DNA sequence: CCAACGATGGTCT
DNA sequence: GACCATCGTTGGC
């Protein structure tokens, strides 16, 4: 089954739309230890306007600068002093918006994920934004890089087995976002209804 | 199963 | 000096 990375145009979608469209695509990270791949099953949108939960809400800073760059690049930042979180820059260039990847269904490189996580159960490998970054071996080296070429890529819905079909729109659940002190109430979290691999209901 | 809590350090005011 | 887009453990059912 040939792999195809998501197009430049795919990433220019409005942020909430991109967050939904990314469900069912495949996040892949290659390191010297090998390749690890997961199917995206949960995302959150962070908007460039009217969203107090978004890092870019108060303008460009050193940390959030990647969010103001080209859509289809990465934004990886340190959360709570311990965990890296992985985002996809969205929308038109320079707006300061992104999609947080919150959970994956493990697809390939599962032994490597198990080693990195120190867990064996599949549902414990990538069921949270910090967990999936650990499982894939993503770190600060992968901040502000292009996702169409390089160590971290996103492949389209058809790049793996047929059993991983694009989720039907009516199977996508929308909820408030998780873990925010402001802006949490906005309905900008999305997940695949029947997935066992999401961070929580 | 689940709610509560502490660890931990960069970023921004 | 306050504020976190989290996680794993702990202790109670």
Image (tube, coloured by chain):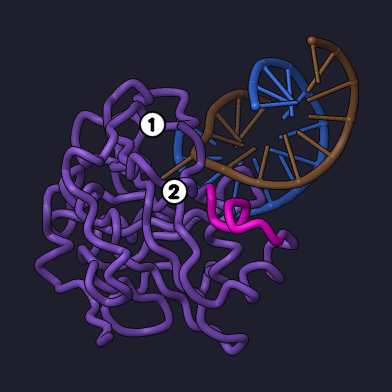
Chain colours: A purple, B blue, C brown
Residue A15: horizontal and vertical position, in percent?
Answer: 19, 47
Earlier-in-chain disc, 2 versus 1: 2
Image height of A180 relative to A117, above or below: above
Image height of A133 relative to A64, above or below: below
Tell if the residue under mark 2 belongs to the same chain as the one under mark 1.
yes
Image height of B6 relative to A36, above or below: above
Determine the main secondary structure of the stretch shown in magenta.
Answer: loop
Q: Nearer the viewer, residue A51 or A174?
A: A174
Q: Is residue A101 left or right of residue A132?
A: left
| Pointer 2 chain | A
| Corner quadrant of residue A57 | top left
Q: Nearer the viewer, residue A19 or A74?
A: A19
| Pointer 1 chain | A
Specify start and end residues of the magenta stretch as a single range. A120-127
The reply to whether discs 2 and 1 touch (Cβ–Cβ < 8 Å) is no
Q: Is residue A122 left or right of residue C12?
A: left
Q: Quadrant of the N terminus of chain A?
A: bottom left
Q: Quadrant of the C terminus of chain A?
A: top left
| Corner quadrant of residue A149 | bottom left
Helix, strand or loop at disc 2? strand
Residue topped by disc 1: A177
Residue topped by disc 2: A102
Residue A8: horizontal and vertical position, in percent?
Answer: 14, 72
Q: Residue at x 27, y 83 (%)?
A: A3
Q: Residue at x 58, y 52 (%)?
A: A123
Q: Nearer the viewer, residue A58 or A149?
A: A149
Q: Residue at x 44, y 48 (%)?
A: A102
Q: Is residue C2 left or right of residue A180?
A: right
């Amino acid at each position: 089954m040939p792999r195809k990375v998501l197009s430049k145009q795919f990433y220019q979608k409005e942020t909430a739309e991109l967050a939904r469209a990314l469900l069912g695509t495949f996040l892949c990270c290659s390191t010297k230890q090998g390749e690890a791949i997961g199917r995206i099953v949960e995302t959150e949108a962070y908007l460039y306007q009217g969203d107090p939960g978004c890092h870019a809400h108060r303008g460009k800073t050193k940390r959030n600068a990647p969010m103001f760059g080209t859509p289809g690049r990465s934004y990886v930042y340190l959360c709570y002093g311990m965990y890296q979180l992985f985002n996809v820059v969205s929308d038109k260039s320079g707006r300061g918006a992104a999609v947080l990847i919150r959970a994956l269904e493990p697809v390939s490189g599962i032994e490597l994920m198990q080693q990195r996580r120190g867990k064996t159960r599949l549902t414990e490998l990538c069921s949270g934004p910090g967990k999936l970054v650990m499982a894939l071996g993503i770190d600060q080296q992968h901040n502000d890089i292009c996702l169409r070429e390089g160590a971290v890529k996103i492949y389209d819905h058809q790049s793996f087995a047929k059993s991983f079909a694009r989720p039907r729109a009516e199977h996508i659940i929308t909820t408030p976002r998780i873990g925010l002190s402001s802006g949490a109430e906005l309905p900008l979290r999305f997940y695949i209804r029947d997935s066992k691999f999401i961070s929580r209901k």
